[in-house]
Amino acid sequence: MRRQTPADVRADTAGRRPPGGRRPVRGRRGRITSLPVVIPLLFLLLLVTVCAAVAVGSVGVRPATVLDVVAHRLVGAGPPPAVMDDQIVWNLRLPRVLLAAVVGAGLAVVGVTLQATVRNPLADPYVLGVSAGAGLMAAVAITLGSAAVAGLSTSAAAFVGALAATAAVLGLSRRAGRVVPSRLVLAGVTLSYLFTGATSFVIFRGSNAEAAHSVLFWLLGSLSESSWSNLSLPAAAVLIVGLCLMPRTRTLNALAAGDDAALSLGVPVHRVRVRLLITASLLTGVLVAVSGGIGFVGLVVPHLVRLVVGPDHRRLLPTALLVGATYLVVADALSRVLVRPEELPIGIVTAVLGAPAFLWLLRRSEAS
């Protein structure tokens, strides 16, 4: 993919518009799509996907029944639904599907942010070792009990592990008091291997096979423990981070063009980079704590979206958010129905879907 030059960034940040009309969204090969049309369509697609995902499962529910249950619960419209339908739709599937949408949106946003911040197309929410650190602490909590992690729950222990991994990576990536992107990626990859090895040791020394199975299922990603109570925190985190990043999309454009271009535009590169990395890592920690390790969403979705809307983060960020949410809702639905009545870890599904997509993107970039 062609990188933005400093001239591109200056023209972009100047907010120039073609005379006599709204600014179009341009894709890689000159395709033009109006963003005010794309966003509502993607939001509508997300709503339809959520409804369909709630309807499918080991016990099928008609989409009309899903809408009836939601309408009755929210505004009291229509007669009360059957107790079984209400239990399946409202208490079991809807919070899970909404959590999948929140996690997918958050991972896509983090992926977009990291790829611009470190100027590395392979950057994703787990490149900094945050997921591996969270996985290690979760493995300790599951196999050795909460007493081994000061009485914390599995999710809380995972979040603490994510914070510790973030602090370690940022500390190791500094040179002359500044965070160096190349050192950041190398430190993240190295610590990921270290944390993964420690997790394997904890599983190997664990007390029983059931605990080892629980750890493995969690590490591969799972939304089976979702509920309304654990939906509010990740939803609030994604909303707050999204609202904080939207006014900074021009800064992301400048960072993606290179440090020299960003400095010429008056961007305090070091301070902004550290803030963005900490923000992305904290959001990743929150998401990993409720969903485990779900890969490829933050890596593949930003690249796919760039093919349609281009590299401008004012368009890329909101579009990737909606596409990531829809993508993970679909992946979660597949994880529940492919081997039903059993359930696949959602990380397996995202890997099977994401790896071919990324290889296709790689061949496409080489051919262009």
Image (cartoon, rainbow, N blue to C red):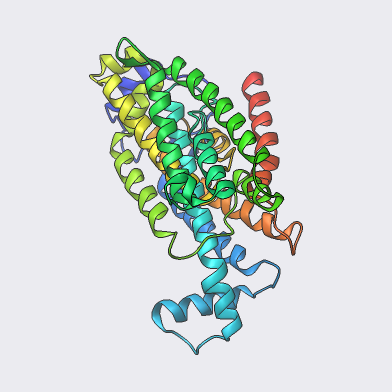
Q: Residue at (43%, 22%) from the top-left corner?
A: 118
Picture coordinates of residue 91 (x, y %)?
52, 72
Task: Give the residue at x 37% y 26%.
Answer: 253
Establish if 332 lies above or below 4: below
Q: Residue at x 68, y 38 (%)?
A: 204
Quarter of the rendering occupied by the N terminus: top right
Name the residue at the bottom extreme: 79
Q: State the residue in front, 292 or 348.
A: 292
Above or below, 100 against 307 in this view is below
158 left or right of 22 in image: right
Residue 244 sits in quarter:
top left
Place residue 76 in its image quadrant. bottom left
Q: Is residue 253 left or right of residue 357?
A: left
Please provide percent x and percent y for residue 127. Answer: 51, 29
Task: Point out residue 294 in the picture as x, y percentages from the top left corner.
Answer: 58, 43
Q: Residue furthest right?
A: 339
